[in-house]
Each structure stands twice: as C-alpha cells, then as structure tokens.
Image (cartoon, rainbow, N blue to C red):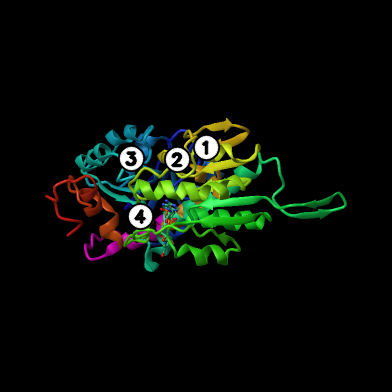
Amino acid sequence: MIIGVPKESFPGERRVALVPMVIPNLIKAGFEVVIEAGAGVDACYPDDNYIQSGARILPGRKEVFAAADIVVQVLSPGSNDKTGKADLPLLRQHQILVGFLRPLGSIETVQAIASAGVTAFAVELIPRITRAQNMDTLSSMATICGYKAVLLAADPLPRLFPMLTTAAGTITPARIFIIGAGVAGLSAIATARRLGAVASAYDLRPATKEQVHSLGGRFIELPIETKEAEDARGYGRAQDEVFYQRQRELLGRVVAESDVVITAAVVPGRKPPVLVTREMVARMAPGSVIVDLAAELGGNCELTRASQVVIEGGVMVLGYINLASRVPYHASQMYARNVTAFLLHLFRNGKLQLDGDDAITRETLVTHDGEVVNALVQKFFSLPAKAKNGPS
Ligand SMILES: NC(=O)c1ccc[n+]([C@@H]2O[C@H](COP(=O)([O-])OP(=O)(O)OC[C@H]3O[C@@H](n4cnc5c(N)ncnc54)[C@H](O)[C@@H]3O)[C@@H](O)[C@H]2O)c1
C-alpha cells in the first residue's frame, strides 16, 4: 500500500500531513510513502529529511495522487473550501482519503467524494475515547490554536502580561478571559498563566470548572440554568436565544474588565453563538484585544470578520483563521503522529479493516462504495439511510 502526501493547497496553509519522523513506523508496518516535492518545506521539513527517513519524493501533485492507494492530507476537499475541489478529479475509485473533511459542512463535496468511489475518513470524527487519544487530531490542533491565540493577543496589547515589581513600581498583571473552556480554551489558559497573566474562564459545561482550576484559572459562574450542557460525545450543546441573551448580560461585566478576551465557544455543526456584542466591546478599555477562535465559522464576537483585524473604539478584534498553520512545525508533527496511529489502527497486514463494530472506524468512515455511509452525516443532512450505516 502506497501512502501519498500532496502539498497542502489551502491559501497560506503551511502544515504537511506526514513528517519525516513517522515514516519509519509506517514503513515498518508495510507501507510505502511518497511525498510531493516541497510538501514539507513551509513546515521546515525539507525533502532531504523525507528521503533519509525512507520516503520517495515525486515531482508533482498529479503524480502523488496517481501513485497513492491512500491519500493523506491535512485539509481535504470540504475543509479546504478554497482549492480543495481541484483535487476531486485527481481522486479515483477505491482510493482511500484521510484528512479533515468537514463532513457537516458541504454535502455536495461529501457526495462528490462518494461519487468518485473513494473510501474517505474524516479525522475530525475520531471519537473522543481513551483508546483513540493518540489519534485525536482535533485536540492536537486545538492545543496549538489556544497557545497561539494568547501570543497573538500579547503582541499588540499595550500592556505587559506578568505582574512585575520593579524600581519603577508595581505592574499589575493582564487579565485574560476565556469563553469556552474546551481543549483550545484550556490551552489558552495554560499559556496565559505561563506568561504571568490572571486568567478566568467560563464554559456552559460544568465539568470544565475543575479543569480551569487545575490550570490556575478562575472559573466564572453564571446564575443561569443550562439545559443538558453536554451531549453524549462530550461536546457543548446549543442553547436557545433566551439563554444566549442572558449569558451576554451576565458576561458583560467580566468582558469589560478584561484586557484580553479569547472566545472559543463552538457547538458541532452549528453557527457559533454571538456571546460578545458590539456594546460589550464598547465597554472595554482602549488597547484591549479580542481573539475570536470561532472566526471561521462566523465568530463569537459581533465585530469579528474572518481573516481580518477589526479595530473599534480602540479595541482590536482578531478574526484570524487556521491558527494551527501558524505553528506549522509542531502542528504537522502532532497531526502526523495522530494520523499514523489512525492508519495503523485501520490497516492490518497492508489491508484496510472495515470493521463496523469498531467505533473508531465506524464513526470516521464517511464515504464508501459510492455512498455517504456515515450515520452522523446522514442524520445531519437528513439523507435517507439507504446505504448501510457504516461499514459492514
Ligand atoms: N480523549 C478524550 O477523552 C477527549 C479528548 C479531547 C477532548 N475531549 C472532550 O471533548 C469535548 C469537546 O472538546 P473540544 O475542545 O474539542 O470542543 P469544542 O472545540 O467544541 O470546544 C468548545 C467549547 O465551548 C463550549 N461552549 C459551547 N457553547 C458555549 C457557550 N454558549 N458558552 C460557553 N461555552 C460554550 C463547549 O462546552 C466546549 O467546551 C470536551 O468535553 C473535552 O473534554 C475528550
């Protein structure tokens, strides 16, 4: 079985799906690996490093798709909504595709992958279960996003982060407020604390309180009742507009008193709720910074514009997308290790094991034999469950 890694084509993307250090493991398991020339350069992995690790370099994208039994990408068609469609004609029947597919994004793209006869696995659907922890690409990327969000806020902030006692007097520490204490939010808390800031956080899932405390953050309690805060998979659940309205009222004071607000409140398959309004931003001190990690999906802040920096009333709102790509060396390393663990799970003796009883395989398999076979995707888009729900 040949694994092919094309260069990422999303504009500005610097990550690469496999790094040289995982190649010996894949070869040991019986795979061959081919890499498009220059695929790792932007993540600081030159072609020579791949060759030394046992991979072959192919000159172009078409050659990689033609040679590969398994195409491994970071942003596959679907999550790459800019240039991903150009890869569709390069895919062929019975080819295997592994990457971020954004399977609840565009059903047209998912159906196009199915129609090409491709067996596609969406890594964002890897279940958050203990035995799949080493495959958890979402956690890896979220950890990097939370870290980078704090650094992006620290740079333009006209204040220092740590408390300093100097001959010129005492400097008070920056106050950082994180809304949404999932993996990215918790990583932001840890990073802010390492830089010496005072960190507070709020999440509608009560379980996060202890996690925030364990990182040295303060948990903000809001006197509102959350209806079934957590779904069966551990994700936050969408609430009604009455809840969000009340949440905004109660969060207003904390936001106004913060030097930095990092928003990371998302609900799978939904537009993120607006939790920071224009009026709330107007109450923040000039020079304050908001980093909206939900920017790509519409944002948690009313002023957020995806990929842009908005300044209003002296408050800077950063709507950068794809933050993990800004730390490409380690983002690629973590992704590659996760994907390698996933491939080693899926394949035995060079053969794909489509075991429908295995939750990792069943929940990640999106298309097979020309059909969209994933139960979650079928339900989300109200597709008739004409094909088997997952592999047989
Ligand atoms: N292997 C494992 O066991 C494992 C690994 C990673 C994550 N997890 C769990 O998976 C879950 C999801 O993690 P994630 O970080 O990927 O999720 P995510 O990216 O969906 O995080 C978004 C966070 O925002 C919160 N949120 C949503 N709406 C909100 C609102 N209105 N106000 C405030 N907060 C709001 C959610 O509760 C969640 O914590 C968590 O329970 C996490 O602990 C488990």
- Left or right of 139, for residue 62: left
Tell me: 326 left or right of 6. right
Q: At numbered mark 3, what does the secondary structure look like: helix, strand or loop?
A: loop
Decide: is 374 above or below 152.
below
* Structural distance between the alpha carbons of marks 3 and 4: 23 Å
Compared to 85, does 129 lie above or below?
below
- Residue kind at label 2, given as amino acid type: Gly
User: Quick one: label 2, few (<14), some, or many (20+) residues within 10 Å?
Assistant: many
User: Which quadrant of the picture is home to ligand 1?
Assistant: bottom left
Highlighted range, magenta: 339-359
| Separation (CA) of disc 1 from disc 4 | 26 Å
Select label 1 or label 4 by which is in front.
Answer: 1
Residue that carries the numbered disc 1 in the rendered image:
279
Circle 4: element type: loop
Mark found first going from the N terminus, 2 or 1: 1
Say whether disc 3 or disc 1 marks the residue closer to the N-terminus.
3
Residue that carries the numbered disc 3 in the rendered image = 78
Q: Earlier in the sequence, mark 2 or mark 3?
A: 3
**Discs 2/1, front:** 1
